[in-house]
Amino acid sequence: MREKQKPTESNQKWDVIDQIVAKELEMFLQVRATDDGSGKACQQEPNMFKAMRWMSHSVLSLKTLESYLSDLKSAAAHNRNLMTEKYALMDNLIPHPTLGQDLILEIAAKEVQWMQEVQGKYPGLIQGKTAEFTNYLVCEYETYSFETLTLLLEDIHRAEMKELNLPELRYRNLFKRLGYSSIEEAQKHNSTQQ
């Protein structure tokens, strides 16, 4: 009888990401965007949500991902919906937590700087408004545990030491998943469609 092979760290990482995205989607579909109880328009596109969340997590370390998965499980066990909290924070409907704010602001500042570099390299393909992106990031990170924030900052510092741009890596992963050989091919395809 053959011994079962141990899963590689890479396989473990993709499995953890799948679990995270499933839990996030479950929470996201419960978010109520208006007083009449109707959901956000993007709730009608769960596959797009899953692709974007997969992309977001695809560059993080296994330790960071496992810590965030633990955050999601803990929140669910305490009847908290982290997606509802994030959107409530974005709209200033609930008070912003103070724990971890220094970490959050450092992480968000680097992510914004990287994103601006990516937008400069791939204009027309990757767009967005800095203020909205910053608010989105800060409010999402405010739902993370202090442990997850600490591990996320370590991921940021490791990327800086290797001179990597995490948003660019995220988009490279996304476009490969969508069938492009590279982000450059996606940019070229996008420019011919305009």
Image: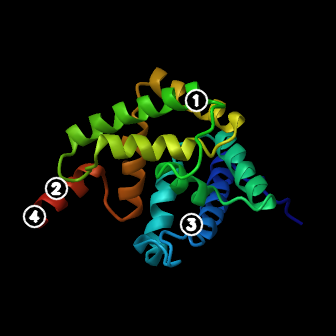
Expressed as whole percent of the image width and height from the top left, the position of residue 1 reads 89, 66
**Horizontal placement of 139 versus 72: left or right?**
left
**Horizontal placement of 162 versus 16: left or right?**
left
SS type, badge 1 = helix
Q: On screen, 131 above or below 6? A: above
Residue 188: mark:
2
Q: On screen, 98 above or below 181? A: above
Number of numbered markers? 4
Dividing the picture into quarters, in which one does residue 130 lie?
top left
Dividing the picture into quarters, in which one does residue 64 lie?
top right
Which amino acid type is marked by label 4?
Gln
Crowd tier of the residue under label 3, counting other residues whose Cα lies within 10 Å: few below 14, some 14–19, many 20 or above: many
Task: Look at the image and tell me in which quarter the C terminus lies.
Answer: bottom left
Which amino acid type is marked by label 1?
Gln
- In the image, 31 versus 58, the foreground residue is 31
Judging by the rendered image, the residue that carries numbered circle 3 is 28
Q: Which numbered disc, 4 or 3, marks the residue that appears first in the sequence? A: 3
Residue found at x 58% / y 40%: 96
Q: Which numbered disc, 4 or 1, marks the residue that appears first in the sequence? A: 1
Residue 101: mark:
1
Residue 194: mark:
4
Real-space Cα distance between discs 2 and 1? 39 Å
Real-space Cα distance between discs 3 and 2? 33 Å
Which amino acid type is marked by label 3?
Phe
